[in-house]
Amino acid sequence: MKYLSFLLLCLTSVASGNKANKHKPWIETEYQGIVMENDNTVLLNPPLFALDKDAPLHYAGEICGFKVHNGPSGSGTVQFEAVVLDRSTGEGLVRSKEPLDCESQREHSFTIQAYDCGEGPDGANSKKSHKATVHVRVNDVNEFSPVFVERRYEASVPEGRLFERIVRVEALDADCSPQYSQICFYDIITPNVPFAIDNDGNIKNTEPLDSKHQRVHTFWVTAFDCGKNRAQADAQVVVTVKPSCKPGWIGWTKRVEYTPGSGSIPLFPSLHLETCEETVWNIQATVELQTGHIGKGCDRDSYSDRSVRRLCGAVRGEVDLLPPPSPAANWTSALLTLPSSDSSLVFSFNGSSHVAVVPEPVVASLSGDHFTLQLWMRRGGASIQANPSQTRGSRKEEETIVCTTVKNDDSFSHYSLSVHGCRLSLFYWPDVSAARPVKFLWKLEQVCDSEWHHLSLSVQFPSVTLYVDGVTFDPALIHDNGAIPNPAPRQRMFIGACWEPEEEPREILNNTIPEVKYVGGYHGLLSGVTVRPGSVEPHSVVECLYACREGLDFGDLETLGSGMKVHVNPSQSVLVLEGDDIESFNRAVQQVTYRNSLRFATPGVRPLKLTTSLRCFNEESCLSLKQLEGYLVVLQPDAPQISLSGVGPHLARPAPEFESPRGVPLFPELRIVCSLSHAVNTAAQGMEGGALMSDAVAHTLDGCEVQPLGEELNSEREELLVDMDVVRERGLEIINTTAYIAITGAESISVYEDVLRSVRYRLAKGSARFERRFRLSCSEMNGRYTSNELTLEVNFLHSLDSLYHPSHLLASQQQFLHPSHHAGELSGHTLPSPHRNSVVPGAATVIIMVCVGFLVVMVILGVFRIRSIHRRGEGSRGGAKEGSGQWDDSALTIIVNPMESYESRMGVAADTEGEGEEEEEAAESPDDASDDQRIIIKKEGRDSNARRY
């Protein structure tokens, strides 16, 4: 029975086992593994375990093995295998079948599958799991050492300099990982060498090298990877020190002198570039001459603007929109003016309150769509304050220079000239009631460089031409400005701002213009703002008017070598040379010149700069040259000496000739000579010392003035006449007032001689006195050089009949008996001296003068007599001692020579001798107390020294 029971139990177990292997094994879907190059065991994450839900049944719940399948690349089965470590737990292990090499293949991928033991020991009816992907990365082992790319490195450097890099060494490591394949640092293993090496292999010298001390330096370097493996073999470095050579410009002269009138002179006659055998394939040198501090940006003609226009042949008819303040031109009186080096009037605008409103009669003369607007401008400038209404961060609005609306035949046109940043814009509206506006734009550096520039805008709508410092600029953009309100059809012009657009036109009541709000205020300086309606100026005239008379130039373009390029900016302040050959470049630099076409150039210093850039085949060791700075000194020109001659100091004519309709010419034989005095080198001629030589030259005067000395001319009795036909024919301007006559305009000396010889002096009937003085002076270069002052004394010759005439006698009596009414006249009309070439007054005049003089003396004697008696009375009461010392002057007798009073008035008394005699008399006086009784009479002559009797 026991045996049967055991058999039944076995049969039952077999039956139940066949039914137990119902489930497949389960593993993870993906595994990540790493393996070292020197190991074959793969460490998986997560660990390899296969699970079976049939556990813990024997066979069906056990894992019998793992199967490795090929990966995506077709590898894996050959190199890796999986084994079961524990059948009951399903733990497995993946390992490589052969050594792995990271350098040949760093990553491997394959699939793995688990299977159970089936239903019995033979593994029948075993079941397999799904396939899981396994990624294996081979970790590197520092098995390789660094190896230098080259075994020997060579370099050559000039002596006496420190270099950031002389040569670069390089080593490589064959390991696959960044940890072991990178070179962490290099090291110089040769001791006591003046070199250092960084972690990138760059070798530099730690001190200047000396070829005389050691010509060749040889040393060894090694390399280490980040695993501290040293290079298999060290590298040798050889540095050769070249003899001293200083690269740069040789022959640079810091100071260059220019004598006015020399034309063009070379700035660098002996300058050449030394590259010390460095191979250079491109050289560029920039020469910069700074002239912004000379006048308005550079040296220009020193004549006035109108004189320059005449000399250049410009068309007349310009209207000055910013004239000097005067009763006739009062719209500029509220503007701030600044001094100018060229005597021109400069107006300052602050963008808010400084606005000039041109009167309507002036605006009415500027109608038409053909006009030329010219002005000097400088953005910013002195005494300019920001507009407080502008908030920080707000977009800056346009600054309006000129804004105007003018009336044409039957319509109104509007235009405004504005600046915004570095842009200049002209907004032009041909017809405010019909046509749309057009905006012309120019992008110019001259607008925003805070320097003086001249702008000339020629408008022949629709054509617009802009000249900046005589150079033409075309509009960069022309477009419709869009929908903006039409300007009011009313003539007006603002300088320095524009008016705020009006939604509805406001009526003018009682000839009063409504208050206008200003917008777009201009910040900067303006000068010489003019508008000339009509045809525009040709380019040659504009260039003559405002082009700089000094600048940089190139001597001879025909001698320019092949491959050389020369560029000069429009203002001729910057010159650029470019080439590829050293010899040709050196010859070109020596051809750079400075020119100044003005005979009387403005003296002073002009800073000079030379900037050089080189491009070499070896950019790492290419030379770097520092900027050279110097200065050009324009010497003081030889001052012209303008000499006025040919006119005697006295001009005596009968009085009736001055009373004739044409008067008497004052300077009939005037001669004007202009000469230059310059030093002459007499040492070359065997003479000691130096000498001055004067050469007569043809010059241009720009003004002469005739001025009466003393009181001004009495317009009712006398006047100066000028031949206006000659003045108009020569295009000169004249100002004729009672204080002076001024003739202005640039013209030749001969023209001024003709005009001045026509100046006549005329008197009204019965207005002749005894003399009148005039002074003549001339100048050139806007008053920079002046002539000598020529003084002419005009004497009026009177006949005896006219002197004895009762009316003449009465006039003479009134003249001398009422000196208070004629003191001003006598200051300009002195009585003639007996030593001069004039007629002595008649006997009646002499008698009257003697009587008047005697009367004055008697009055003075009486006054002093009373004062003397009064003092003597006080002295007697003061003490007997003082009374005893008094001198009795009761018998005092004074004898006065009547002619002496006359001579003192005529200015011929010998005052010096009289003073000497008075000193002798005072020394002989025995008692000082007698001074109280001396009579002191002050002379009325040329000095006020007291005479004592």
Image (cartoon, rainbow, N blue to C red):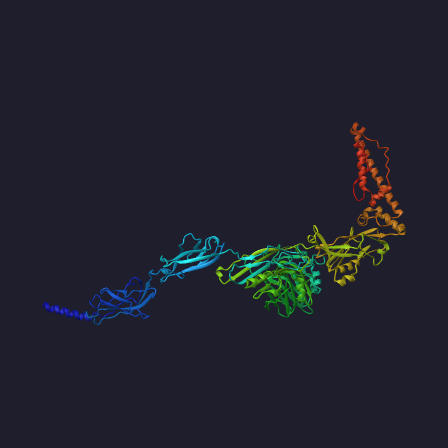
Quadrant of residue 139 within the rendered picture: bottom left
Q: Is residue 518 left or right of residue 69?
A: right
Residue 458 x, y percent position in the rendering = 65, 66
Q: Residue furthest left?
A: 1
Residue at horizontal 78 percent and vertical 54 percent from the top: 645
How many dots with numbers? 0
Residue 700 x, y percent position in the rendering = 72, 59
Relative to 756, say whether 864 is above or below.
above
Q: Is residue 533 left or right of residue 18?
A: right
Image quadrant where one finds the N terminus: bottom left
Residue 891 x, y percent position in the rendering = 86, 33
Relative to 872, say whether 369 is above or below.
below
Q: Residue furthest front?
A: 686
- The residue closer to the viewer here, 194 or 939, is 194
Residue 504 x, y percent position in the rendering = 63, 65
Quadrant of residue 418 within the rendered picture: bottom right
- The residue closer to the viewer here, 75 or 391, is 75
Q: Is residue 622 left or right of residue 14?
A: right
- The residue closer to the viewer here, 938 or 220, is 220
Q: Is residue 729 in view from this perspective?
A: yes
Q: Is residue 496 in view from this perspective?
A: no
Image quadrant where one finds the C terminus: top right
Q: Residue furthest bottom?
A: 125
- The residue closer to the viewer here, 499 or 884, is 884
Residue at horizontal 49 percent and vertical 62 percent from the top: 618
Quadrant of residue 15 within the rendered picture: bottom left
